[in-house]
Amino acid sequence: MTTQSQPIDLYYTGTPNGRKITIMLEELGVPYTLHPINIGKGDQFTPEFLAISPNNKIPAIVDPEGPDGQPISIFESGAILKYLAEKFGKFYGHSAYERVKIDEWLFWQVGGFGPMLGQANHFVRFAPEKVPYGIKRYTDEANRLYRVLDTQLAAQAAKGKHYVAGDDFSIADIAIVDWSRGAEGLGIDVTAYPAFTAWRTRVSERPATQKALQLVV
């Protein structure tokens, strides 16, 4: 397995997208240095940050030991997870077939689960005025996505498998888990999704994942 001598620089805010990467790095056990990005103060718009994250979003990393031993910067949480999984040979299956299955659920999260839960969270909790149409649209979609996830996890459990994709814990689980912890704040009844709640507890209790979830910056 690839080793890491110099710390990976992680540009981070304590959001579900940021915690994807701290979970991954803690699970890998590789050294990293946190660089907090205060999005309330506009740190994400500085020229230094835009040089590594042109979409002015966290997370971003700089790996001083990138391909061919050269530094590389990477933005977008899904791309970072794939890069780290491929570099260190962990949490990304053992075959091309398994990697396809993991990619399906990784992209499901970055393309749907995260954005739709983010919109639901905005309309339910932070919008300056209550917009019933927006609240209903996005909470309905959030419930649908939790139902999709629960159905997948129930199908996995029926085959004796305990994670979202394949036989083992993977970057798909890492991508989904912290986003999934906001269900109750959206008024979603998680008791309706028993396979999901069992999976969320199981993943959240992993020691490295717990350490990342409890990190305060």
Image (tube, helix red, strand yellow):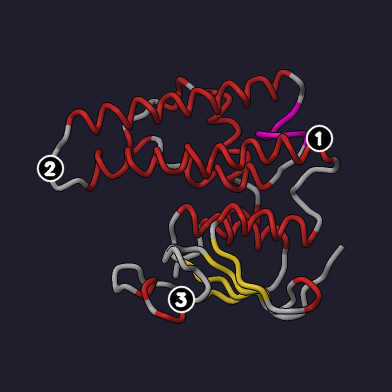
Q: Which circle marks residue 129 in the picture?
A: 2
Residue neighbourhood size for the residue with mark 3, other residues' Cα within 10 Å, grouped as few (<14), some (14–19), many (≥20):
some
Q: Are marks 1 and 3 in contact (CB under 8 Å)?
A: no
What type is the residue that disc 3 sits on?
Answer: Phe
- On the rendered image, what quadrant is the N terminus found in? bottom right
Horizontal side of residue 91 vs 19, given as left or right = right
Label 3 residue SS: helix
Q: Position of residue 202 (x, y in %)?
A: 62, 39
Q: In which quarter of the view is residue 29 placed? A: bottom right
Which residue is the site of mark 3? 49
Q: Quadrant of residue 127?
A: top left
- Frontmost of labels 2 and 1 is 1
Q: CA distance from mark 1 to mark 3?
A: 36 Å
Q: Against 92, is 88 above or below?
A: below
Res 104 seen here: yes
Q: Is residue 103 above or below residue 214?
A: above
Q: Is residue 163 magenta?
A: yes
Q: Nearer the viewer, mark 3 or mark 2?
A: 3
Which residue is at 41% across, 66% downward? 56
For the residue pair 54 and 103, the one nearer the viewer reads as 54
Image marks 3 and 2: residues in contact by CB distance under 8 Å: no
Of 110 and 172, nearer the camera is 110
Residue 67: where, in percent of width, then height? 77, 71
The residue range painted magenta reads 161-167
- Residue highlighted by disc 1: 97
Q: Give the structural element (helix, strand or loop) at label 2.
A: loop
Say if 160 sits above or below 171 in the image: above
Amino acid type, callout 2: Glu
* Amino acid type assigned to the residue bearing label 1 in the image: Tyr
Judged by its main secondary structure, the magenta piece is loop
